[in-house]
Image: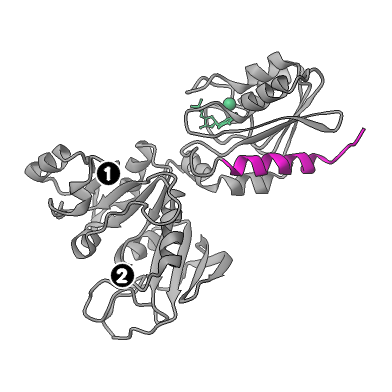
Amino acid sequence: MRCLSHSYYMNVALELAKQGEYFVLPNPRVGCVIVKNGTIIGRGFHQRYGDRHAEVLAIEDAIKNGYSLKNATMYVTLEPCSHYGKQPPCTEAIVRSGIKKVVVATKDPNPLVNGKGIARLKSAGIEVIVGILENEAILLNKDFFKFIKTNLPYIAVKVAQSLDGKIASPGGERFSFNTEEENDFVHLLRQKYMAVLVSANTVITDNPMLNARFGKIIRQPARVVIDTNLKIPTNSKIVETAKDYQTFVVYSKKNEEKIKILSQSGIKLIEADESENGMDLRDALSKLAKEKIASILVEGGGNLNFSLLKEGLADYWYSFVFHTFIGGKATKTSVDGEGFLNSYPKLSNVKITRFKNSTLIEGDISYV
Ligand code: AOF
Ligand code: ZN
């Protein structure tokens, strides 16, 4: 009998989980393998939001392959669920199957599960081991973990800037040196998030579509406009195409007439609290989380980016640095606002990708 380590099988389950990437949010990516006498007899991963869970698919796969699950061991990247959601509890399917040991990478932070799944398995006499490749499992679902623990979406900010940090031309016009390479990358990136977010100023100056239309197209993210005073032009592309893409406008100052026009065009309006400098961003984001928007790619301007960093709301950063200078004292930069005084946000786990005309610098944002 071949006997490989727990981490070997968990790694196979993690690789399976990754295949759910674009489709499962706001659920987590989950992968599962079932092992008997050293052989993987069943595989499954959560494939699409609302669909069946990894464990149930792995059990079905093993049965379809003609195996008995009696005395088998299950490796799953997240604690099996024990509640009735869109799917019945995985714990019951596991208990019924005859599996005798379950190896879990990490506990499910969802308050509906959080330890209850493990307790249920143990109460049925199943041996449970927790913590194999735990860091990898958390990293795989860092958006889901933030969303479920804080009721705020996971926020990534994407900027395209010159070598000297400018994001517009000195006259204020849109700056885009994007070639096919960057376009394909960004449009795939948009699809990895549940929504793309800009401020109303960006809609006014650039009139963007904010959809995915270059390269490989798998899904369309929702679109969010942060629009404190409801300035969004009713003839902008976003308003005109609101029936084709899920679109939210978040505002703080009521304007009944504009609200009516925007709602009729298919936009969902969200009212967020006001703050001294316009909108309370944390409140806006928590209201988007209530709409099940678990992750957002922000493609806004320097002021919005500054506020997100200042309030510690941004989690990840992508800077496309084009190998070009723009110059100009007053030219807009990727992070404007009044600047940080003594504590500067930083990037960690930095990754660098070279394109022909630009270099992408990305990483986790840490606030110290
Ligand atoms: C698992 N295996 O593959 C996934 C789990 O609405 P439902 O029924 O799909 O439940 C969603 C919740 O279940 C989700 O928030 C997370 O806590 C857990 N996801 N659990 O055992 C899976 N996707
Ligand atoms: Zn489940």
Q: Residue at x 46, y 75 (%)?
A: 358
Q: Is residue 44 above or below residue 210?
A: above
Disc 2 is placed on an element classified as: loop
Q: CA distance from mark 1 to mark 2?
A: 27 Å
Write down the region rendered in magenta. Answer: 1-19
* Quarter, ligand 2: top right
- Quarter holding the N terminus is top right
Would you identify the image quadrant in which residue 58 lies?
Answer: top right
In this view of the protein, which residue sits in the foreground, 261 or 240?
240
309 left or right, relative to 21: left
Residue at the far right in the pictured view: 1
133 relative position to 340: left or right: right
Residue 225 seen in this snapshot: yes
Q: Residues within 10 Å of mark 1 (few under 14, many from 20)?
A: many
Is residue 168 left or right of 193 when viewed as pictured? left
Furthest residue to the left? 257
Mark 2 Cβ and ligand 1 under 8 Å apart:
no
Q: Report which quarter residue 39 is drawn in.
A: top right
Which amino acid is tagged 2? Gly
Residue at figure coordinates x 57%, y 66% from the top left: 350
Mark 1, secondary structure of its residue: strand
Indicate yes or no whether the magenta region holds residue 11.
yes
User: Which residue is depicted at the point 33% across and 73% down?
Assistant: 167
Contact check, label 1 and label 2, Cβ < 8 Å: no
- Badge 1 amino acid: Thr
| Residue highlighted by disc 2 | 337
* Residue 81: % across, % down: 59, 26
Query: Mark 1 = which residue?
Result: 247
Total labels drawn: 2
Query: How does the figure colour the protein chain or chains?
Result: one colour
Write the residue at 36% across / 63% down: 305
Residue 123 locus on image (x, y percent) = 71, 17
